[in-house]
Every structure is written in C-alpha cells, then in structure tokens.
Image (cartoon, rainbow, N blue to C red):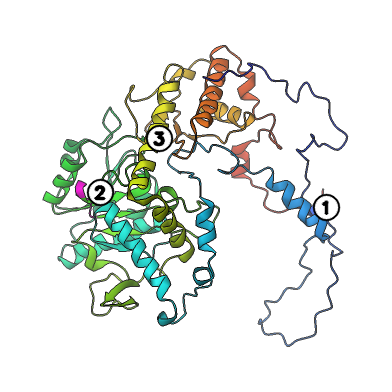
C-alpha cells in the first residue's frame, strides 16, 4: 500500500497572487468578461440586403455575443480544458456509468474516409463496406449474447430499453393479450430508466423488493407474477454490483407466466465473453456500446444502444434492419409485410459508434473481450478487499462483479456525509464515485475502476481513500465539510443552484 502525507499544505497557507492564478492553474473569466459586445475580433463585410423570408421571426436586436481575437479565443478554451476531468486525465471511479478508456486506434479507424463520410441518405449500392461492417458488428453482438437478432438503430441505452419493450408490447399484442397484460415488474434496485420506459409505453409498474443480500429472489418474483404481467426488467449484474444468482429460476417463472424477460444490459461489461444472456433466458437486452466496447460516453454526443432479441421477439424488431440475400446486403426500410413494430428513429444507428465498437472487438478477439470482463471484476474486488477494513459494505463481505458498493455506516457520528467524502476526493485529484445510488443503500458509494487501470493506478486510488477514511475517523471534519478547496470554484450551494439556476450572463 502506498504512503501519502497526512497533511498537505493547501491554499489557506499559500499567499494570494495578484492575477488570481496559481502557476499553471490559471483563473479564467467568462467570455463575456473578456470580449466586447460592440466589437469583433475579425473583419466581416456587412451582410447584403436580402428579401426577408422568416415571416417576422428574424432577429430584431444584435446577437449579443462578445468579440474576441483568435488568440483570446484559443487561450480561453485551452484554459477551460485544463479544468476538465476525464478518463484521459485520471481514474474515473463512477459506478453504473462505466468510464472505459477509449483506445486511440478506435478513433483512427472511425476517421477512415469511407466510414466518416458515409451519409445516411446515400444509395445503398454506394456503401457496401458500411453495410458489411454493421453485419459483422451484429454477428459479434449476437455471438457474445447468444441471441437470435439485433436491432442496431437505437441511439442510447434508454432508447434501447424503449426498443426492447416495444418489441415485447408488439409480441403481446400479436397474441391478443395487449389489453390484459399491462404490468411490468421492476426490481427495487433498478436503474431509473426502467420504470420510466415502462410507464412511457403505458404499462403500470410493480416493484419487486430486494432481498437482504441485495439481489432479487425468485420467490419474490413468483409472488408478483400474474396473468396481467407483461414482462420483468432486470439488470444483471445488478446495480449493487452483484450477480443475480437466481436469474435462471426468475426467467423460468416469468416465461411460465406467459411474460417476457427484458434484461437491462448496462452492466454487460462484467460478463461479456464469459456468460451469455440467452443462457439465462433473456428475451431482449440493450447493450451500451460505450460501457462494454469503449466507444465514448456522454457529453451529449452521438450514442448507440443496440438491442439483441430472442427468437420469440426477433420478428418484431424495428425497421430499418439489415437483411442478407445471398451475396447482397440491404437495409429494409419499411415494415409492411413484416411483424416489425415499425420505425423508432430516422436512420440505421450511428456509424462512428459502430466502427469504434467493432475496432475494439477485433483488436481484442473473443478471448480478449472475456479477459477485459474478468479484469474489470478483478479490479473492483481488489478495491473492495483493500478498503473493507475502513469502509463498510451494505451486503457483507461478499465478492462483487465489476463495481463495488459501500455505504455510509462507517461515517456515522463523525460529522462527515457521503457528499462531504466525495468533495474531498476532488481535492485529491479524483472525480467522485457515484453517490447515493442505488437508492436501496443509505449513503451509497458505488465505485467502478474498470479493467484498463494498472495496479499502480489502483494502489494510489486505494491509498487516497484510506487516507481520507483515516482523516474522517480521526475527527478532521473540516477537511471534508470545506472541500473542495483546490477546485476553481470551491464548494457551491448545489440545492440553490438546482432550484434557482443562473442561465444568462448579465453585467453587474
């Protein structure tokens, strides 16, 4: 275990600087405070007079953006970029929202001209390589999951949930049970998108309580089943970072009741290449490419959430979908003549995400994908075993999967909350772990180190958390309640910021 000094001289001991800068940590004002509203940093010719065609919707006043020179603009965004935290800057311990390293070979391949320039409206005859890539990706996804078909068009995990549940709803309607089967079972520890998806489609939600060990009990599912139940939405490994040991019995009970088994695939990265969801009895499952196959995550950019379907649900997959006729691949655009539930998005997924995911798969091979899953589980259990003597686990000292869950029982009576502990992590140079989720655990701290972290990286992270835990137990509450002290804007009133956000700059 690494040793670190118990006390580091901080900003309270350092004199203020004239500029507000601290060496390379430079204070940076807003763009509006740098530039001028009445000037621009470039020469632009006056726009010619044209016929107005916006029906009175054209702008009546100046746009109100500050004018900056090119050096000012570059410096502003470079300085801001230094304040970002990313997986490229350090370990990103968010649990449930996997932050995997994105190999740069993925980016290089995604920028190949034939893929980067492929247009969704291009004639299919002009993009045979793109179609073949999608077919190969689909083959890998079906092989790894053991499923019968895959829909590539969903844009993200929640979109994939919607796709899978729409397929289930269509299958139920095809059997003439659409009016009677209107309840979806949701475990107490589920991701929030699960009940939201079910409700959006008009289903009622029935909660299945979590067992004392954090898993879902097959008997509890049997007690919740009835002729009105359409499906269960279950995550495996679950949100507590635990494998659902009774998942086969749960699937059998659901099928015996005439319902379908939707598996939330958010945590597939813990079992990819090791266990196949089809063998559990899963009928539909979305796959977060960013979690399992390293494509970039979040930031509002393009996403992808393919959905694998069992043989029972394959006929109801959405259009567009790929179909092979001998040597010819084609995208089927229309649902007429099929049992498809129809179209849920304009085009067939996001090519850049497909390329990155397949590049990751081909670089690793089947054995490499399995090794990545095993290493993710090993990393999480290394963190668990290294911290179990100073932090408490809600479900006992049980081996976890790809993420380890701690609670705040060990902080009780010390004047330090989960939020305080997380804020102190920022001072130490780490993004906080997932806090207060899953909701079934009080003061939850969910940590997922991923497989890409070296032992040295994990050792430093563990030593940091042990140092913080020791400080909390020794009564150094000030270190936590005043954190972060080193961040550019220190601690803010997050409740006030959420309720009364300032969304528009105005001169003082």
Give the quadrant of residue 10. Answer: top right
Mark 1 crowdedness (10 Å alpha carbons): few <14, some 14-19, many ≥20: some
Q: Nearer the viewer, mark 1 or mark 2?
A: 2
Residue 45 spot, x, y in % from top left: 84, 77
Instruction: Determine which of the numbered discs, if any, sits on residue 403 in the image.
Output: 3
Distance between the Cα atoms at labels 2 and 3?
19 Å
Give the quadrant of residue 26. Answer: top right
> What is the span of residues highlighted in magenta in the rendered image?
279-283
Name of the residue lying farthest toward the top: 474
| Sooner in the amino-acid sequence: mark 1 or mark 3 | 1
The image shows residue 150, relative to residue 21, as above or below, that is: below
217 vs 9, left or right, is: left
Q: Residue at x 77, y 38 (%)?
A: 24
Residue 354 spot, x, y in % from top left: 43, 61
Instruction: Determine which of the numbered discs, if any, sits on residue 277 in the image.
Output: 2
Distance between the Cα atoms at labels 1 and 3?
44 Å
**Circle 3: element type:** loop
Let me know if residue 476 appears in the view. yes
The image shows residue 72, relative to residue 316, as above or below, that is: above
């Amino acid at each position: 275990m690494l040793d670190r000094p118990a006390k580091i001289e901080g900003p309270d001991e350092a004199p203020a600087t004239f500029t507000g800068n601290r060496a390379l940590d430079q204070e940076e004002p807003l763009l509006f405070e740098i530039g001028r509203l009445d000037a621009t940093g470039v020469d632009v010719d006056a726009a010619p007079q044209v016929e107005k065609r916006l029906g009175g919707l054209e702008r009546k006043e100046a746009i109100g953006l500050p004018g900056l020179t090119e050096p000012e603009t570059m410096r502003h965004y470079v300085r801001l970029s230094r304040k970002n935290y990313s997986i490229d800057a350090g370990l990103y311990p968010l649990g449930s929202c996997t932050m995997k390293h994105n190999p740069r070979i993925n980016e290089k391949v995604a920028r190949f001209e034939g893929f980067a320039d492929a247009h969704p409206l291009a004639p299919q005859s002009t993009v045979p390589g793109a179609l073949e890539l999608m077919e190969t990706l689909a083959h890998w996804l079906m092989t790894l999951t053991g499923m019968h078909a895959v829909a590539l068009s969903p844009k993200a995990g929640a979109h994939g949930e919607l796709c899978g549940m729409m397929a289930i709803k269509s299958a139920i309607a095809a059997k003439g049970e659409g009016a009677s089967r209107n309840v979806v079972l949701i475990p107490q520890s589920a991701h929030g998108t699960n009940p939201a998806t079910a409700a959006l489609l008009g289903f009622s939600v029935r909660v299945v309580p979590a067992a004392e060990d954090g898993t879902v009990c097959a008997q509890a599912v049997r007690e919740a089943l009835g002729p009105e139940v359409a499906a269960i939405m279950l995550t495996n490994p679950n949100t507590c970072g635990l494998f659902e040991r009774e998942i086969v019995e749960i699937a059998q009970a659901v099928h015996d009741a005439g319902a379908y088994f939707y598996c939330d695939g958010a945590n597939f990265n813990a079992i990819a290449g090791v266990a196949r969801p089809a063998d559990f009895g899963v009928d539909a499952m979305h796959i977060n490419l960013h979690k399992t196959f390293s494509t970039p995550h979040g930031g509002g950019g393009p996403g992808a959430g393919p959905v694998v379907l069992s043989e029972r649900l394959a006929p109801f997959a959405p259009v567009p979908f790929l179909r092979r006729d001998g040597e010819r691949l084609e995208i089927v655009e229309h649902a007429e003549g099929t049992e498809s539930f129809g179209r849920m998005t304009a085009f067939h997924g996001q090519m850049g995400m497909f390329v990155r995911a397949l590049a990751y798969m081909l670089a690793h091979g089947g054995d490499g994908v399995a090794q990545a899953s095993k290493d993710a589980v090993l990393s999480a259990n290394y963190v668990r075993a290294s911290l179990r003597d100073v932090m408490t686990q809600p479900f006992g000292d049980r081996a976890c999967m790809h993420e380890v869950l701690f609670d705040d029982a060990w902080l009780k009576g010390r004047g330090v909350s989960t939020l305080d502990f997380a804020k102190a992590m920022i001072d130490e140079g780490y993004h906080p772990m997932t806090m207060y989720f899953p909701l079934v655990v009080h003061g939850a701290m969910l940590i997922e180190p991923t497989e890409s972290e070296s032992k040295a990286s994990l050792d430093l992270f563990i030593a940091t958390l042990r140092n913080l835990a020791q400080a909390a137990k020794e009564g150094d509450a000030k270190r936590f309640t005043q954190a972060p002290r080193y961040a550019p804007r220190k601690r803010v009133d997050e409740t006030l910021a959420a309720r009364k956000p300032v969304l528009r700059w105005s001169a003082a």
